[in-house]
Amino acid sequence: MNGADVLCDVLLANAVNVCFANPGTSEMHFVAALDRKPEMRCVLGLAEGVVTGAADGYARMTDRPAATLLHTGPGLANGLANIHNARRARVPMINIVGDHASYHLPLDAPLTSDIEGLAAPMSNWVRRIAGPDDIAPAAQAAFRASLTPPGIATLILPADAAWGEASSLLSAKVELAAPRSVDAAIVRKIAGAIRAAPGRVGMILRGPAAREDALEIAGQISAVSDVRLFSDVLIARMQRGRGRVAPTRVPYPIDAARTLLADIDLLILVGAKEPVAFFAYPGKPSRLVSEGCEVMSLAEHGENLKAALAALRDELGIKPSQPVPVATAFPDEPAPRGKLTDDAVALSVARKLPENAIVCDEAVTSARRYFALSAFAAPHDYMMGTGGSIGGGIPMATGAAIACPGRKVLNLEADGSGMYTVQGLWTQSREKLDVVTIVFSNRTYAILHGEMRNVGVNAIGENARRMLDLDQPALDWVSLASGMGVEAARVDTCERFDALLDSALSRPGPFLIEAVI
């Protein structure tokens, strides 16, 4: 048994049975080992950003890591942007990065690089395998590191460790510790602070605290103790829709965010960090809460967030049977007609969304209205890119579809962001994934036009315009999708969009709608 076989065995013993891959020569022995393990699903991405973004989407939906297979330092570097997003989402991932044979490294062959240096900023844990007999303990340590608490584990696999003879395993399975419990003293302190600031308390819910059962507990606290519920600016995963408690999303624009939080004197964090502005702007503060706001953490990432919320509810004397207000029916709003707009797309998607769907939102500016409307949609899971690095939407939808066969996935995609990882459409076609991609084709980096105004530039000249607009030539998303094997169509009216969305939702397999707005 060689080292590559041992690595496969450790992964499979711990239910890591999906490998998103873009391999090269150094990884061929591992590829051969995967070929001997039919229980491992191997998914090819045509670019490393697709590989790492798909592993992110998979982990968000399963709470378990997938493996990625990347070729030396440059392959890892190509995937780092979506590893960054995954790290910010705090999801588990095991990156396997092939490297030269250990004795070949001193020769400084062309692909030699500092893989540890490249991996460290985007990983919570990095280890280079010392030899064939180190593979089993290193792989077990990588699995444990990815899940306690969830994080990015990067394992560097030298080629000679992969092909070398390795000792057989007595046991490959890793036992994980239970999530940490919240400190009872912290619960009592926060309950007292809530009683002392009636009507001026907010709570930000993240991670497992944004799932339906935990949201219900938070809703009980909100209903009785007048605590306002919020989500992060960028949401890793939240269960939304009719019948569920619906926190308000903290807006991306700094002025809107500060206005929303202006009257909050106590902000409670549940698996979250204090929200701050994405960037520094001249004359504006970096913190979004008011200067006198006290920020307290009920439970941190890696702790049992649902149990912490239940403990706080009990400390406040709220009964577990306490009913909570939830969204029931759509607001009375007529269906838009005529020229297609971004708001019309958001409204149509929210109204037509199938039950138990998954929405991956990378439309940035264009789909902003969707999140508020999603409270009235059919119950579903909602995810966004979490690190601000664009190019995560198409791969995230790809990974989510592999994680959850039988569930319809909708990807709300900006045209500029989508071009970073358009190759993911090919993977959707090859794997026959049930993903509907809706491209908001406004042919510009709309968010950057707003950022120019935010920094005080109101008049945009020709040089700036050429860096912010996606025209001359305009992107042809129907041709791009067709070239990747995905059926596609273009629409520019509300009526045609509604009809095409109905058709796309009624059939399995990948489909792309270019929504010209």
Image (cartoon, rainbow, N blue to C red):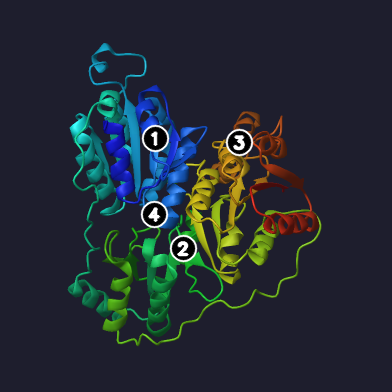
- Residue linked to disc 2: 238
Work out whether residue 126 or residue 45 is closer to the camera in this orientation and state it: 45
So how many labels did they put on this image? 4
Q: Position of residue 484 (x, y in %)?
A: 64, 35
Relative to 205, say whether 449 is above or below. above
Closer to the eye: label 1 or 3? 1
Q: CA distance from mark 4 to mark 1?
A: 34 Å
The residue under label 3 is 468
**Mark toward the start of the polypeptide (1 vs 3):** 1
The crowding category of the residue bearing disc 3, from other C-alpha atoms within 10 Å (few below 14, some 14 to 19, many at least 20), is some
State whether residue 123 appears in this view.
no
Callout 1: helix, strand or loop? strand
* CA distance separating discs 2 and 4: 20 Å
As helix, strand or loop, the secondary structure at mark 2 comes to strand
Spatial CA span between label 1 and label 2: 28 Å
- Per the image, the residue denoted by label 1 is 69
- What's the mark number on residue 276? 4
Mark 1 or 2, closer to the camera: 1
In the rendered structure, the answer to whether residue 69 lies left or right of residue 314 reads: right
Residue 430 position by quadrant? top right
Amino acid tagged 3:
Leu
**Residue flagged by tag 1: what amino acid is it?**
Leu
Disc 3 is placed on an element classified as: helix
Q: Which corner quadrant of the image does residue 69 belong to?
A: top left
Q: Earlier in the sequence, mark 4 or mark 1?
A: 1
Task: State yes or no: discs 1 and 2 in contact (Cβ < 8 Å).
Answer: no
